[in-house]
Amino acid sequence: MSALFRLVNVSKRYADTVALQPTNLLVERSKTTVLIGPSGCGKSTLLRLIIRLIEPDSGSIEFNGEVIRPDNIDVLRHRIGYVIQEGGLFPHLTARANVLLMARHIGKSQEEMQSRLLELCALTRFSENLLLRFPLELSGGQRQRVSLMRALMLSPELLLLDEPLGALDPLVRASLQKDLKEIFTRLGQTVLFVTHDLAEAIYFGDEIVLMNEGRIVQKGSVTDLRERPADAFVSEFIHAQRGIPIV
């Protein structure tokens, strides 16, 4: 299966701090690739580099065989959905306006937007009765569903999720995890998912990518990481995760 996304020797530093060492990564089509690791390991930096919120210092990033450049990123962003922790919704816009923001920007018709909006409400189990509420009038789980709808509005080929469930209470988080996994499967979605929670990585990931200090330490299944650790950090990270069976 060919890769939808490819990073080739991509690196980033801020003054004397290395945020991401030269990194190579393939993101396979219709799979969920999970980036996991401790805080500050480079997970979120990698996502921001892909969406070009920050510029790499070296290397290239390819989307479907096309190198991402400053002159084509605006068009390519229409093919990439992006969800951040706590949703990142605009507080002065209703849920409906948040979801339709990019579709309006590129000139979609009212009929097309309304049809897609209703599809997404059904897909994400978000009540149409809540569409006219503002983010502060919604629960944390509801805000994340709105953020997901916004990211899916243009039917993106790649979905980037940066710890989207980290701020939710356990019951809401478990419900959203189940719904998200069903959505990914139903859509055949290609996903790059950032988390610091190994149980969540195991639940979602077709491939787990463990990072530390700005580099990829090991890729594979949780069995690979547990039984064939690349170094001592991998074993330490696995054993530090409470609630994950060790044997």
Image (cartoon, helix red, strand yellow):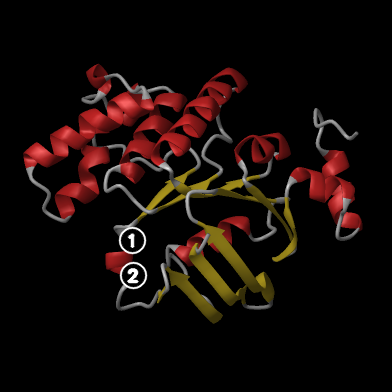
* Identity of the residue drawn at 14% across and 34% down: 114
Residue 76, quarter of the rendered image: bottom left
What residue is shown with label 1? 77
Q: Is residue 55 visible?
A: no
The C terminus appears in which quarter of the rendering? top right
Looking at the rendered structure, the kind of residue marked 2 is Ile
Q: Is residue 17 visible?
A: yes
Q: In the rendered view, does 56 fall on the left or right side of 151?
A: right
* Identity of the residue drawn at 42% across and 73% down: 65
Q: Nearer the viewer, residue 157 or 41?
A: 157
Residue 17, quarter of the rendered image: bottom right
Q: Secondary structure at mark 2?
A: helix
What residue is shown with label 2? 73
- The alpha-carbon separation of the residues under discs 1 and 2 comes to 6 Å
Q: Is residue 215 above or below residue 187?
A: below
Residue 86 image position (x, y, % from top left): 47, 37
* Identity of the residue drawn at 64% across and 72% down: 23
Residue 200, quarter of the rendered image: top right
Residue 173 image position (x, y, % from top left): 56, 26
Q: Secondary structure at mark 1?
A: helix
Q: Nearer the viewer, residue 121 or 242?
A: 121
Residue 111 image position (x, y, % from top left): 8, 37
* Identity of the residue drawn at 40% across and 74% down: 68
Contact between marks 1 and 2 (CB within 8 A): the answer is: yes
Q: Nearer the viewer, residue 223 or 246?
A: 223
Residue most extreme to the bottom: 58
Q: Nearer the viewer, residue 223 or 172?
A: 223
Q: Is residue 138 above or below residue 230?
A: above
Q: In the rendered view, does 5 fall on the left or right side of 78?
A: right
